Structures are given as structure tokens and as C-alpha cells.
Image (cartoon, rainbow, N blue to C red):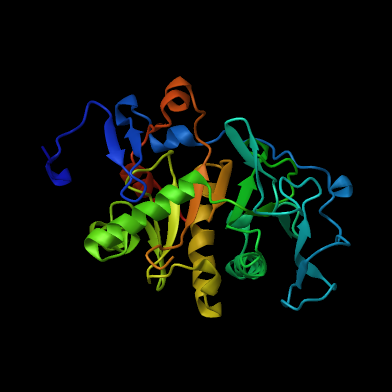
């Protein structure tokens, strides 16, 4: 029996919510009574690598892209540089060759692994200006365009780790771009789910979601003329946040210069609200005509335990509605 969400009584048990795109289930365990302020990280001295010994302070010789503050591609007062990862997870080789070993198959880890470095040793994206954030997004776009058509590349992942607990081994703010010869299962499920929805409804599933979210507003965190920030209905983690273009677009790399600025505004504010509201949580950020590109911001607020490992179903102990209400109230400049 289906029951309208508006008719729910006060819940005393957890709630299973299904992701409309991938079909995956998540548990919203509000019965555990976590409040937004329970997620505030204790104020602590920021542990950063000393500037003098930081490998990202200088201009790297084998860089593949560099921007100065005035966005010229020169080696002057650089603001952003993109370099090959010194210890790549994927590298040059022969692609699309699959090998057999008994019942198994494998292929070489052929691809690209790059590091996107911003000049400031201390400021992550949530502390940057809108203009600085736009520079970073422009670098993402340029490298995406350079890598996506390589014959060995099936998927390009762009992500930003903040803090050692999120996976960053160097504390100097940086992002990574990894281009790989296969499509990851999570991405495949999301794309396949959006395709199924389109075949049945002749509409984009994400556009459908955004129309509803902008109407009810209870999971809406921020919006400007062209972009919207929401807490997903089926949030996998507490304070999970997503940034979507309001207009339908399947390809991030086609974003215009004007929309880059508005995306930078929404992206920076989303991260700044998390930065200020939760006292700089560690976090990860990651990025077909029926699809709708978006940025995902995933604070590290919990550790997988037996249930999550055994079932693949994630538990969030705060509802996205309450998380969005909290973040809407966080003041940022």
C-alpha cells in the first residue's frame, strides 16, 4: 500500500527510502535522534604539512595546465596547475585488451591520473571566493575536454578530498582527475536508471526531481538563477548535498563561461555552509542525453559497520529535510 508522504505521522522507527534514479535503498534512521549540532566537528588545530616541505608549493616541471591569477596560461604568478600524479592509479599502456585466467578476466589499469593544485596552502574550496572557484571549475572543464575522447577512456572522475580522513595524503588543497577504461557500477546504475525513467515517462528523472524539490522546498538549501543545491531525498550520508543545473544538460564539459560563474557561486556556497555549519568536516566531492550532470558533496560523518558492509545499504541518522533546514540557516559571505 502506498501512502502519501504528507500524511505520515511522527515516526518512531527508521525509514527506508529508494533512490529514484539508481533504485538503491537507504535507511534514514531518525529514531536514533541525532541532531544537526551532533555532527559539529570539535574545533581543532588544522594539521597541515609545513609550507617549506610541501611538494605543491612550487610550479611542477611536467605540468599539463597552468593558470595565473588573470587566467592567462603562463608561468607567472600561477594560481592553478594540473600535473600527472606522481603515484598514479592508472597510467599509459595498451587499452581495450582483456585477458583470461581460468573463470576470471582482467585488463590493464590504463588511463590518466592527474592532480589539480590551487596555490593557497591553507584554503580549500569552501574558503575560496566565487572567482577562485570558477578558475578551478574551468580547469576541471578543460582537462575533461582533453581526456574524454581518448580511445582508452570510458569515464572521467573528478573529485576533491578535504582532510586526511577523506583520503588526502597531502594536506595542501588539491583535487584529482582520474580517467579510466571502464564505467564504474554506481555510475552505470545511475545512467541505466535515468534511461529507464525516460523510456517510461519521456522525461528526465533529474528534471522531475528538481521540479518537485523547488516546489516543496524542504530539502532545498540554496539556488541562484541557473543552479540549485539540495539534500537528496534518499541521502546516503548525513548532510549529503548535490548541486544541479536547473536547465537540462547531460554534459558538464559543455557549460558556458557565464554558467561556470553561477555554478561556482552555488558550489562554493554549498561547501561554505558545510565548512561553517559543521566546523570543516572531511568530505569528498565527485562529478547520454537522458542524463543530467551534477556535483555530489559527501561529508564523512560515519564509518561503515557490519550492516552497511554486509548489505551495501547505507544508514543516515539525520533526515535530509532536517539537514537542509540546518544548512539554510548557516550564514556565509
Residue 7 in the figure: left or right of residue 195: left
Q: Is 41 or 91 nearer to us in this picture?
A: 91
Residue at point 65%, 70% (across, down): 142
Residue under the point 54% across and 66% down? 264
Image side of residue 286 versus residue 220, left or right: right
Residue 1 placement: quadrant: top left
Residue 263 position in % (x across, y down): 50, 68
Expressed as whole percent of the image width and height from the top left, the position of residue 218 reads: 28, 52
Based on the displayed image, in which of its 4 quarters is residue 247 positioned? bottom left
Q: Please say whether residue 142 is visible from this viewpoint.
A: yes
Label count reads 0
For the point 45% across and 50% down, the residue is 188
Q: Against 47, is 78 above or below?
A: below
Report the residue at 75% width, 78% height from top: 72
Q: Is residue 130 left or right of residue 112?
A: left
Q: Nearer the viewer, residue 276 or 152?
A: 152
x, y percentage for residue 304?
A: 50, 27
In which image quadrant can residue 105 be found? Answer: top right
Q: Is residue 214 visible?
A: no
Q: Closest to the observer: 280 or 184?
A: 184
Does residue 164 sit above or below 124 in this rendering?
above
Horizontal and vertical percent position of residue 181: 62, 53
Q: Does residue 240 appear left or right of residue 170 in this picture?
A: left
| Residue furthest top as drawn | 306
Amino acid at each position: 500500500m502506498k501512502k502519501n508522504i504528507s500524511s505520515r505521522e511522527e515516526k518512531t522507527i527508521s525509514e527506508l527510502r529508494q533512490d529514484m534514479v539508481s533504485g538503491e535503498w537507504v535507511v534514514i534512521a531518525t529514531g536514533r535522534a541525532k541532531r544537526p549540532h551532533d555532527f559539529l566537528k570539535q574545533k581543532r588545530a588544522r594539521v597541515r604539512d609545513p609550507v617549506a616541505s610541501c611538494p605543491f608549493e612550487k610550479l611542477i616541471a611536467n605540468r599539463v595546465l597552468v593558470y595565473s591569477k588573470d587566467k592567462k596560461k603562463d608561468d607567472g604568478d600561477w594560481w592553478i596547475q594540473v600535473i600527472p600524479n606522481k603515484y598514479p592509479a592508472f597510467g599509459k599502456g595498451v587499452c581495450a585488451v582483456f585477458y583470461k585466467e581460468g573463470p576470471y578476466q582482467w585488463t590493464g589499469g590504463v588511463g590518466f591520473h592527474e592532480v589539480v593544485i590551487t596555490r593557497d596552502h591553507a584554503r580549500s574550496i569552501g574558503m575560496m571566493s566565487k572567482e577562485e572557484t570558477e578558475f578551478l571549475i574551468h580547469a576541471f572543464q578543460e582537462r575533461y575536454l582533453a581526456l574524454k575522447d581518448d580511445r582508452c577512456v570510458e569515464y572521467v572522475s573528478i573529485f576533491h578530498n578535504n582532510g586526511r580522513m577523506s583520503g588526502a595524503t597531502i594536506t595542501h588543497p588539491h583535487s584529482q582527475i582520474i580517467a579510466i577504461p571502464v564505467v564504474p557500477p554506481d555510475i552505470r546504475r545511475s545512467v541505466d536508471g535515468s534511461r529507464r525513467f525516460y523510456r517510461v515517462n519521456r522525461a528526465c528523472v533529474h528534471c522531475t526531481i528538481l521540479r518537485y524539490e523547488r516546489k516543496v522546498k524542504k530539502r532545498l538549501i540554496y539556488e541562484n538563477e541557473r543552479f540549485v543545491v539540495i539534500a537528496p531525498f534518499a541521502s546516503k550520508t548525513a548532510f549529503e548535498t548535490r548541486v544541479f543545473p536547473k536547465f537540462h544538460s547531460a554534459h558538464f564539459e559543455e557549460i558556458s563561461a557565464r554558467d561556470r560563474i553561477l555554478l561556482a557561486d552555488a558550489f562554493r556556497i554549498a561547501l561554505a555552509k558545510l565548512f561553517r555549519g559543521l566546523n570543516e568536516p572531511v568530505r569528498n566531492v565527485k562529478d547520454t542525453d537522458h542524463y543530467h550532470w551534477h556535483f555530489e558533496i559527501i561529508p564523512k560523518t560515519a564509518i561503515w559497520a557490519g550492516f552497511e558492509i554486509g548489505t551495501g545499504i547505507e544508514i543516515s541518522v539525520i533526515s535530509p529535510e532536517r539537514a537542509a533546514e540546518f544548512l539554510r540557516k548557516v550564514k556565509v559571505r
